[in-house]
């Protein structure tokens, strides 16, 4: 009984410390918070959007909820949404730091989850210069047209129901893969599956994301180990693709006539 009681005592102390620190913070109005879980009990309804609408009618278009240890601001008017998403977007543009994204995105170092700042702006600049310029779009046009043609032909020949979402995902993968590496790869199905597993893990609800101070939860449930395995799977596939691309580039360079 000692370990569970010690854990509960530890959580209670953290709760008191957090409560003390937030005493003087001015927050929007919101429903009363329960110890430890905050307002999580209010969102257990099968239709949480209705609960949020009812709360907004009571507390106004901007309110404060506590989901576990995470303070959350809920906005439910077009005017305030514009203020946050457009006028002050640089203040609110960072994504929440979740364990799944930390592991899968190499400590938030990719462009999707990197915090706003100099590093993220540099990544954005590289993407615009290398991927979005007119020369790249024109040179890859035939790839897009060819893949769309193959996609339409494949659907038209099918005599059974198809999963359109899966097929569109496959289409996008083939286009991006050919533009990036210049050819298709045999491990396409394995790579798409790994990407889908990673994306699902990144958006799935997990209790440890609401209690980040309890870092052991992910390890005790085995989630941390599963995420690390998925990351290794993705990394091994990408390393193989990059190495193949480098080798092909060297072959092309070696075939060029040498100047004397």
Image (cartoon, grey):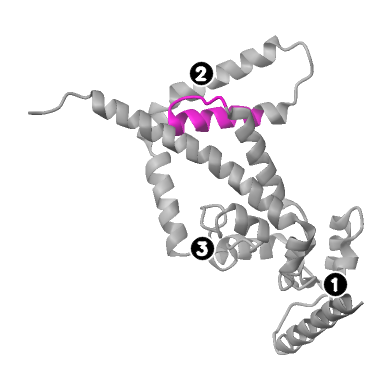
The x and y percentages for residue 133 are: 38, 39
Mark-to-mark CA distance, 1 and 2:
53 Å
The x and y percentages for residue 9 are: 84, 83
| Sequence-earlier tag: 1 or 2 | 1
At x 79% / y 14%, what residue is drawn? Answer: 160
Q: What element carries label 1?
A: loop
Contact check, label 1 and label 3, Cβ < 8 Å:
no
When asked about the image quadrant of residue 59, the answer is bottom right
Q: Tell me where the magenta segment starts and ends, as one range.
A: 168-186
Q: What element carries label 3?
A: loop
**195 left or right, relative to 259:** right
Residue 26 visible at all: yes
The x and y percentages for residue 183 are: 46, 25
Question: Above or below — where is 69 with respect to 142?
Answer: below
**Residue that protrudes farthest toward the left in the picture:** 260
Instruction: For label 3, count other residues whose C-alpha is less than 10 Å away and answer few (under 14), some (14-19) or many (20+).
Output: some
Which quarter of the rendered picture does the C terminus lie within? top left
Residue indicated by mark 1: 37
Say which mark, if any, is on residue 10: none
Mark-to-mark CA distance, 2 and 3:
37 Å
Mark-to-mark CA distance, 1 and 3:
30 Å
Which quarter of the rendered picture does the N terminus lie within? bottom right
Which mark is nearer the camera, 1 or 2? 1
When asked about the image quadrant of residue 139, the answer is top left
Say which mark, if any, is on residue 146: 2
Front one among 2 and 17: 2
Instruction: For label 1, count other residues whose C-alpha is less than 10 Å away and answer few (under 14), some (14-19) or many (20+).
Output: some
Residue 75 visible at all: no
Residue indicated by mark 3: 116
Contact check, label 2 and label 3, Cβ < 8 Å:
no
| Sequence-earlier tag: 1 or 3 | 1
Examine the residues drawn in magenta and state their main secondary structure. helix
């Amino acid at each position: 009984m000692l370990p569970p009681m010690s854990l509960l005592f530890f959580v209670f102390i953290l709760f008191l410390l957090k409560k003390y620190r937030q005493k003087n913070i001015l927050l929007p109005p919101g429903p009363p918070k329960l110890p430890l879980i905050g307002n999580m009990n209010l969102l257990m309804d099968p239709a949480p959007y209705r609960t949020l609408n009812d709360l907004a009618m009571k507390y106004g278009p901007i309110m404060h909820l506590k989901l576990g240890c995470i303070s959350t601001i809920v906005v439910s008017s077009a005017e305030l949404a514009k203020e946050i998403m457009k006028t002050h977007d640089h203040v609110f543009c960072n994504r929440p730091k979740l364990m799944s994204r930390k592991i899968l995105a190499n400590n938030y170092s990719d462009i999707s989850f990197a915090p706003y700042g100099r590093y993220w702006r540099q990544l954005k600049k590289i993407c615009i210069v290398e991927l979005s310029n007119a020369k790249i779009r024109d040179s890859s046009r035939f790839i897009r047209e060819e893949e769309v043609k193959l996609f339409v032909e494949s659907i038209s020949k099918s005599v059974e129901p198809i999963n359109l979402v899966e097929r569109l995902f496959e289409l996008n993968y083939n286009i991006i893969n050919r533009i990036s590496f210049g050819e298709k790869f045999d491990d396409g199905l394995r790579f798409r599956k790994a990407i889908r597993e990673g994306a699902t893990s990144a958006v799935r609800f997990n209790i440890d994301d609401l209690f980040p101070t309890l870092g052991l939860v992910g390890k005790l449930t085995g989630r941390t180990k599963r995420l690390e395995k998925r990351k290794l799977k993705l990394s091994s596939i990408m390393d193989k693709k990059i190495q193949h691309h480098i080798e092909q580039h060297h072959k092309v360079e070696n075939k060029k006539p040498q100047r004397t």
